[in-house]
Structure formats: structure tokens, C-alpha cells
Image (cartoon, grey):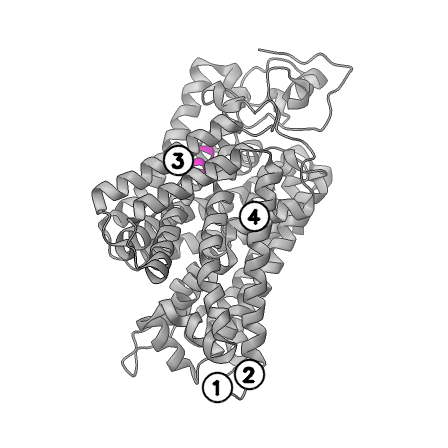
Amino acid sequence: MSDASELGTPLHTGREYVSELNVANRSDVELLHSKAVGLIGVLFLTLTGSAPITAMLLNVPIVVGNGNGIGSPAAFLVATLILLVFSVGYAAMSSKVTAVGGFYSFISHGLGRELGMAMGFGSVVAYAVFEPSLCGGFAYFMNLKIAQLAGINVPWPALALGMVAVIAILTYFDIKVSSAVLGVALVAEVIILVVFDVGVFTHNGHGAAVQAAAMNPLAAFQGFPAHDKLAAGAAGIGLFFAFWSWVGFEMAPNYAEESKDPKRIVPLSLYISVLFLGALYTLTCWASQSGFANIDAAISEAQNNSATFFFDTASKLVGPWVSSLMSYLILTGSFACGMAFHNTTSRYLYSLGRERILPAALGRTHKTYKTPYNASFLQSLASALIIIAFAVFSGSDNPATQAYGELYGLMALMGTIIILSAQAIVSIAVVVYFYREHPQDSHWWKTTVAPILAFIAQVYIVYLCISNMAFLGGGFAFANYIPWLDLGAVLLGLGYAFHLKRVDPSKFNKIGRLVYQGVPDPGIIGHNE
């Protein structure tokens, strides 16, 4: 079934309708900066969203101490394989649909406008809460650093809001500015983690205990019993935090319209991101636990003093300068990660704005920089309001609990549930889309088996998240409302789609359908509203 005949009467049919859906043919659509970034630029924009150093320093101690124990590196290895399978179908879809809407556009094309709109609203909420989440993490570590250097206790809300303000300024300018800033942060993070890994592994026999059993894939599905004053570990917790470490890599399609060759760059960036992060995460996790005399010592440190899990090993086996640099790079990493999610949220809002689903002002781009500046401003405002709300209701005098435990932890959890759910739904959308729209390009592995396997795996991870909500939520009461708030965002989008279908069919027909085909078609006069 073609786009022109699906769900209602289209404005036009045939080639003219297809041309109208190409934003390059529409004078009423303000475009982003096309061909602004290449493969490296897209990788900077997406890999930084995964925040390698933040993922390792914050997630690995939980995977080791509360999840898989000696099998923690295997959890990251299994996550790499599953996400690689997911990327097969996701990349295939991105080669057909070039749109800034990402999940929103893909699901709309594959499973219908209603579900596309539902997950579009959900994705906006998910990415929107990631920025204030990272601001909370940044504020916590910055508060500690300032106290260490100057002996001053700066209230965490001021530090978090300061980060929002700086991100707002930087993202106002050309996407190349964001790419450059994020690139510097990413390179620094990767270098220090590689130095840490090499330093630990080269000290094997001098305080390090490298064990091959840590890489057994079966160990990813095993926890460990309580013993020697150590609490038990659950495999589900370890696997969830391993997957959590990748959130951000899936943003590549959102930059398709600003890349030089989206049909090639987006699929490549997905594969490179998964494999690169997978290798880095697996080796870094393996190195971190290998820095202890035995696995029980690593588990004990992870359970009782997770903040120094990496720092102590780095100082002992590599040098104090490494742990010192890590304490600074966790700040730049948190900032860069928040900025990456800000960019993605802005592009989701821009996509919904240019289709007139949300106010048209959100679909405008800056005359000079071609950035979605109105959408960017709205995201900054939303982040600031979330931070202020946490400061009012939780307090501002305890950064460890309020900024890190609540703002960072709860908002990250809220967004991650939606992202993993969206990835599962996208996988099914890929199967349906190729079967219905491009049967000649359908492939038994790329567009059928791989997406179905990815769907099953992603649903399982979401189940692990929901079933371990008491632990993942840190005991905070707000955690009990997170699944319902996420569901509410999705249902709001679903309800709005049905409303448009009834009262404004022409607008409904365009949900998720505006795509970028590169250049205008001189042979067709596009329809302008």
C-alpha cells in the first residue's frame, strides 16, 4: 500500500504527492543545514550521547556489584551483539526513509500514523528528560570538584541551570559548532578510557587479576548468590545497565537531513557506534574488575564504595594522574551528553513543528545557522523547569541525593524505558514497511529475522526494567509513577493522532511523512499550504 492511498484521501496522488512529501520541494518548510556534517561529525553527535566515560564510571560498578559479578564484561558483550542485530533492520530503514523524525518517522511509515504519533510524543518526552538528567549528574560532580578546589559549596540547582544556559547558547549556532564541541569531549573520554584499559592489562601479575571466565557469554545471564557479607547480584540488573550504556547511539537518523550522504552515513554510523562502544565498554568493564585481587574484592568495592571503583584502580595500576583526569572528564562527558540529547530533542520538535502537528513556529530554522532555534529554546525552557521542580520538591542542599540520585537517576530511567520500547516497535515497523512498501528489497535476514530477534530482545530488556523498578528507582517514590508517566505520553500522542484523523485528515495524512530527498524536483510544483 502506498503513502498516497493509506488512511484517508491524500491531497494529491502519484508523483506529485511524493514530490510534496519531499521537504526540498516545499516553500513552506524551513530546512536544516544540509550537508553540514560528514560521517565523523554524525559519530561525534551520536556517540557523545552515549557518554562513554559517564556510562563506564556510573554503570559498571552497578553491573559488577549488583548484577553479574565476574560475568559483567559478558553482559556488555551480549548487549553489543543484540544491538548489532537491531542495527541491521534500523539501518535498512534509514536507507529508505531520510527524515529528522527518527523513531517517529520510521514507525509512522511502517506501522501507521497513529502509532507513529504515539511514539513520537513518547520519544520527545524521553529525549527531553535526558538533558536535565545529565544536568543533575553534572551538578553533583561539579559541586564536589568546586568544594575540593575552592572549599565552596555551590547549590546544585545553580550549576544545573548554568549547564542548560551554556547548552542553549552553543546549540543556537550552526550544527558544526555542536559537532566540534562534542568531538573534543568524545575524543578525550575515549583516550582516557583506553589509557586506563591498557594500564590495567599491562599490569597483569602486579595487582591485577584478569580472568577469561569474565568473557563467557553465558555469564551475562547469571547473577551471584549472597556470600561473605556481599549482597546477591541479579543478571537482569546487570543486563539492563549494560543496555542503558548505549542510549544515544540510535540518534543517528535524526541527523540524516544535515549529513552529506545520509543513505551511506547513517547506516555506517549505527554499525560503527555499536561495535566501537561495544569493544570499548566490554574491555573497560573487564579492566575495571581485573584491577582487584579477586572478583569478591571487586564486588565489595562496587557495592560499598562505587564512587572510587575506577579511581582507586587507576591510581594504583596506572597513575594518580589518570584518576585526576577522569574526575574532570566526567564533567565534560556529562555536559557533552546533555548537549547531544538537547540537539536530538530539538530535531524531534522541529519535525513535529514543520508538519504542523505542534505549533508551526517549532518548525522554523535560523536564517543564518539553519538550526531549529525555536525548538531548541523550548527544550532549554523545559529542562530548566524540570530542574527547578526537582529543586523545589526535593530540595537543594544535598547534591548526592537530590541532583544525582533523584534528578539524574529518575529522569534517565524515565527516558530509557521509552527509548528501549521505541527500539522494539521500530524493529516490527521495519518488517512491515519492507513487506508492504519495498517487497523487492525485502531480505530474509536484514528486514525479517534480525528485526524480529531485536524486538524480542528489546521487549525482554524493558521487562527487566519494569520488574526491577524498586532497585533501579533507588527507593524514591517517584519511580513508581515512571511507567505510568511514560505510558501517558504515548497515549497522549495516540489520542491526538485519532483526533487529527477525525477533524483534519489532510494534516493526519502527513504525520511522519515529510522526508528529505536531497534536491527539489524542477518538474513538479509542490503544494504549499
Q: Is residue 434 left or right of residue 282?
A: right
Coordinates of residue 8 in the picture (x, y in percent): 54, 18
Three-letter code for the amino acid on which mark 4 is drawn: Leu
Q: Main secondary structure of the magenta part?
A: helix
Q: Are marks 1 and 2 in contact (CB under 8 Å)?
A: yes
Q: Reply above or below: 24 against 436.
A: above
User: How far separated are the C-alphas under marks 1 and 4?
Assistant: 35 Å
Three-letter code for the amino acid on which mark 1 is drawn: Gly
Q: Residues within 10 Å of mark 4 (few under 14, many from 20)?
A: many
Three-letter code for the amino acid on which mark 2 is drawn: His
Image quadrant where one finds the N terminus: top right
Nearer-the-camera pick, 260 or 156: 156
Three-letter code for the amino acid on which mark 3 is drawn: Val
Q: Which residue is mark 1?
A: 207
Q: Residues within 10 Å of mark 2 (few under 14, many from 20)?
A: some
At 59% from the left and 74% from the top, the residue drawn is 198
Q: In terms of secondary structure, where does tag 3 sit? A: helix
Q: Reply above or below: 527 against 477.
A: above
Q: Which residue is mark 3?
A: 490
Q: Are marks 3 and 1 in contact (CB under 8 Å)?
A: no
Q: In terms of secondary structure, where does tag 2 sit? A: loop
Q: Are marks 2 and 3 in contact (CB under 8 Å)?
A: no
User: How far separated are the C-alphas under marks 3 and 1?
Assistant: 51 Å
The magenta span reads 120-125
